[in-house]
Image (spheres, rainbow, N blue to C red):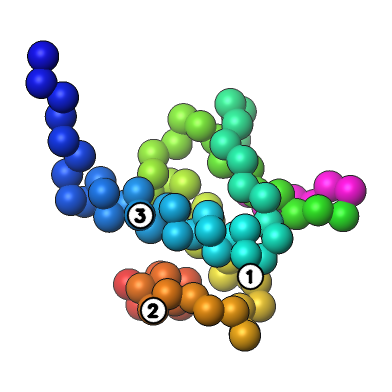
Amino acid sequence: MATRKPTSTALHSKAQLDQLIRLCETLAIHVREEEMEGRGGLYQLKGQRHLLLPQDLTMDEKRDILIDALKRENLEGVFVLPALRSLLEGSA
């Protein structure tokens, strides 16, 4: 049985998701995927920031949660890829 190749859109979404997660890690936000109910989001526990992503969400839904969390962060002085900056500023 042949395996399906991911579409270019799926690859693009996965790449964006990975880049957003790396940006969170740069900002000392620990990103975890968990089996859970609800939408997930950013929280602080014992002085550390965590962002929970429900496992059952689509890549686009996870991306949106990451974008919402990162929009609240001070990114001044942090290198952000231009494509990600466009997403965070709402122009993409």
Is any atom of residue 12 visible in this view? yes
How packed mark 2 is, by other alpha carbons closer than 10 Å (few <14, some 14-19, many 20 or more), is few
Which residue position holds label 3? 15
Residue 15 placement, left or right of 88: left
Q: Position of residue 74 (x, y in %)?
A: 66, 78
Residue 38 vs residue 62, the one in the foreground: 62
Location of residue 57 (image quadrant): top left
Evaluate whether residue 86 shows in this view: no
Using the image as rendered, state which of residue 42 and residue 37 is in the foreground: 42
| Magenta region | 41-46
Q: Which residue was labeled with disc 2?
A: 82
Whether tag 2 and tag 1 are in contact, CB under 8 A, the answer is no
How many residues crowd around disc 3 within 10 Å: few (fewer than 14), some, or many (20 or more)?
few
Circles 1, 3 touching at the beta carbon (< 8 Å): no
Q: Are marks 3 and 2 in contact (CB under 8 Å)?
A: no
Give the residue drawn at x 47%, y 72%.
88
- Considering every residue shown, the one lying at the far left of the view is 2
Mark pair 3, 2: CA separation: 14 Å
Mark 1 lies on residue: 72
Of the numbered discs 2 and 1, the one sitting upstream in the chain is 1
| Amino acid type for the residue under numbered disc 3 | Ala
Percent position (x, y) of residue 75?
Answer: 61, 78
Under circle 2, the secondary element is helix
